[in-house]
Image (cartoon, helix red, strand yellow):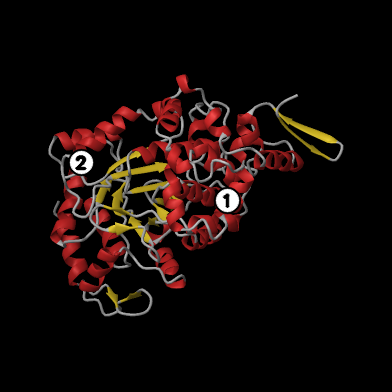
Amino acid sequence: MSQYTHIIGARSYQFADLKDLMAKATPSRSGDYLAGVAASSAEQRVAAQMTLASLPLRTFLQQSLIPYERDEVTRLIIDTHDAHAFATVQHLTVGDFRDWLLSDEADELALSALAPGITPEMAAAVSKIMRVQDLILAAKKCRVITRFRNTIGLADRLATRLQPNHPTDDASGIAASMVDGLLYGAGDAVIGINPASDNVQQVIRIVHMLDEVIRHYDIPTQSCVLTHITNTIAAIERGAPVDLVFQSIAGTEAANRSFGINLALLAEASDAALSLGRGTLGNNLMYFETGQGSALSANANHGLDQQTCEARAYAVARRFKPLLINSVVGFIGPEYLYDGKQIVRAGLEDHFCGKLMGLPMGCDICYTNHAEADQNDMDVLLTLLATAGCNFIMGVPGSDDIMLNYQTTSFHDALYARRVLKLRPAPEFEAWLHKMAIFRDGEQVQLNDDLPPLFSDALLRLVSTE
């Protein structure tokens, strides 16, 4: 008989190993059915969750879900684990840990001290037995603050990534989106562009264009071209004024290999960017994106459920002290997160697990057009994440990314969240918005309806000449 057994009534549920138990305890989602690891019934899922709740947290230090010798992410998790930080909760079961996280004892200071002692598997395990309100409450108490040219993650703040993508990287089109976003108070997390053409020369051109705008208007923010990390290294070697280094990452060595990366390459890029010394307030300069299903889509999940794989990606991110990390929660498609309900749950799980591990979590609250989801679902997730203390969200003109062809959050959505929940931009960026007369004074963020056109006209001319 398996050591992972639970009896409900006259029926005994057995789980082959810890990997199987974790998968069967996961709330229902299409990717786990696709992988063949999901629970076959609601009753089996409950049995797995109850079995998981009684499991000692230290089990995850004794049993690796992917063998140590086969996976560098596993080695990173084990080799960097902070036993001293873990000592606070080492005597707890997964269920006891949930109760502790929801208690008043687990305050911001305690959770910050604990973060280095929490492995991804511990975070994933406790999230599987938590309700939506649990995920929100516990994440809200986790404060993770990062700095480059401004301060992100402070209490009662919500930052935005201004995402002025264009399907041909046209300077005028990018400029129009930048003007639109800045005039709505977006862009404090980063002005980040997904280039349509992923060649190094084009990357360098866009980096210079963004740097010119930021310097010309003395905007307290940072830029990023979301290209492959090898292109960013090449751009730095050619003297490009790179602020943030971007890369998509995953939770297994094999999945990262499918992205063309490994831990050594990430370290090389981080060192290259640090050598430029472009941060004015801090040196957090990595920007990572993740998403449930990426490991499975690369046939690199090792039989793990997709949410546990996702949490393992946060160990990779944590190694490099990023300024920003976000789950692109519904981007991969309905094969992995079928509908709005699954997307909402996954977004809250990702945010909670990342924050618990000490990461500055944001979220790309999004869906593809063939998913069973709509903008109302995204409004729900936006409101819940903003309530949970999410560090940043995306800002795209009209919610529709015309280059990547998916639906996400708009400048208007960020303004809604800030107004309803009385949240403000990063303090340095907010001061700049007032200085430029984009915001006017008030108890909540308010746009200046009398803004003269000089700023927007000048910005359009500046970028269009690049």
Residue in view at x 58 percent, y 35 percent: 305
**Would you name the residue on which mark 1 appears?**
345
Which circle's residue, 1 or 2, is located before the other in the chain? 2
Residue in view at x 39 percent, y 64 percent: 155
Specify the quadrant that holds the N terminus.
Answer: top right
Residue in view at x 64 percent, y 38 percent: 55
Residue 315 % position (x, y): 42, 37
Q: Give the camera-side residue of 198 and 256.
A: 256
Q: Amino acid at mark 2?
A: Leu
Q: Give the camera-side residue of 266 and 234.
A: 266
Residue at disc 2, secondary structure: helix
Residue 330 % position (x, y): 50, 47
Q: Nearer the viewer, mark 1 or mark 2?
A: 2
Local packing at callout 2 (Cα closer than 10 Å; few below 14, some 14-19, many 20+) is some
Query: Is 10 left, or right, of 141 in this rendering?
Result: right
Q: Is residue 76 visible?
A: yes
**Would you name the residue on which mark 2 appears?**
274
Q: Quadrant of residue 65?
A: top right
Q: Indicate whether 163 appears above or below 17.
A: below
